[in-house]
Amino acid sequence: MINVSKLYCGLAGPSDHLRYAASAAAGPVVAYNCTRRCNLRCEHCYSRSGCDKAPHELTTPQAKRLLAQLKDARCPVVLFSGGEPLLRDDLFDLLAEARCLGVRTVLSTNGTLIDRDAAQRLADLAVAYVGVSIDGPPDLHDAFRQSKGSFQRAIEGIGLCQRVGLRTGLRFTITPQNAGHVPFVFDLARDRGVRRICFYHLVRSGRAESGAVPSLVQTRSAVDTIIEKTALCTDWVDEVLTVDNHADGPYLLLRMQREGHPGFERARALLEKVGGNKVGQGIACVGWEGNVYPDQFWRDYVLGNVNDESFGEIWRNASDPVLWRLGHKDQFADPRCRRCRWFTLCRGNYRFLGPDPADGNWLNEPPCYLTDAEIQGGVPVPLGGRRLKSPPTP
């Protein structure tokens, strides 16, 4: 995540202790897609959610064992997602178990199933944050979600969460159809008293696998608008973040450099401290059947299953070729990335599409949108005094 509010505006954020001061011994933030079931059918759904329960969805005892494993692995946050997590019958039991274990929980939801009772129970179980997905103005949102009235139901869900004191935010995935609606999201946050907005770059996975992605021009325009709007909303928004394209960090710095922004060096130091893209290192995903993935938007390659071995054993498996490569990007990142002067604070969006981790299938996804002129001016990233061993054989 790139915290535009902190980097560009100097605001302290509620999640700074996780983003900038995490212990080196901490485990990854884990997205737990606890169910495949969903009451909507979003065009860009990364998990290919559906109406029916998956045949091998973790049972309640299995899911509770998973939470204990995540506790043992020192995971600082577990994000309950789906599908639609509120369609999992034992969701509140699992949240109660996480609370007993001392595991911090957050919820990603389409918002349409949040009624007064659900909101109160989430608050009582100390859910730290509820993120509700919005795709743009009502008609566009409803068409995207293939459900008439889903926008209004999501807005009502947000209001019910706010009434019981739940920290609530908006989640917006940038697509070719809605890239021009960034201002609407800020206006909605202002009008509804929402103090956190996350803008996601589209990853070609799930139902978005073969669809159109925003052009580089659309992406740059959307990010420029996010930066400009963030600077105007510091009185009523705590955090504005972008997610899943770490080119946003250098792009923000380049803008600050052009503007002679006094916070440039501080922002650069913070990005260096975070260390760029943490997929497969500081971010993980567990699917509804217990499969472990490098992140929630990259679900074709399975690292292992928590029914066969613990999450910690899977995550620390030095023989897995994908985890190994993700931990050694200085050698194996995209060649253009390794020539980039910003590499140490970005480290690219390095992954492959499909299940095959062969060398030729790795790429930047989502694509880097910086120009050659914007990445040049530095020196190639050195490989060090000795070359590391070759990665494990896939």
Image (spheres, rainbow, N blue to C red):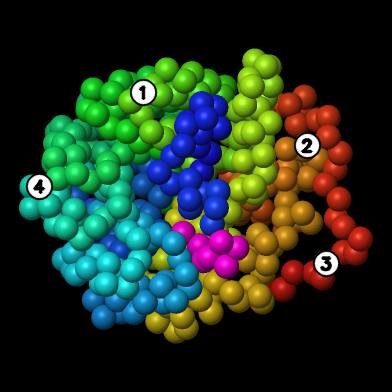
In three-dimensional space, the C-alpha distance between marks 2 and 1, rounded to whole angstroms, equals 34 Å
* Spatial CA span between label 2 and label 3: 22 Å
Q: Please, is residue 30 above or below residue 72 in the view?
A: above
Q: Give whichever of discs 1 and 3 has the lower sequence position.
A: 1
Decide if residue 210 is in sight here. Answer: no
The reply to whether the magenta stretch includes residue 73 is no
Which residue position is annotated with label 1? 235
Residue occupied by mark 3: 388
Q: Which residue ends up furthest to the right in the rendered image? A: 385
| Element carrying mark 4 | loop
Q: Main secondary structure of the magenta part?
A: loop
Q: Is residue 334 left or right of residue 297?
A: right
Say which amino acid is labelled 2: Arg
Residue appearing at x 53%, y 21% in the figure: 224
Q: Give the mark, 3 or 4, whose residue is nearer the N terminus.
A: 4
- For mark 1, give the secondary structure: loop
Q: Is 11 or 179 nearer to us in this picture?
A: 11
Residue 385: where, in percent of width, then height?
A: 91, 61
**Which residues are drawn in magenta?**
23-30
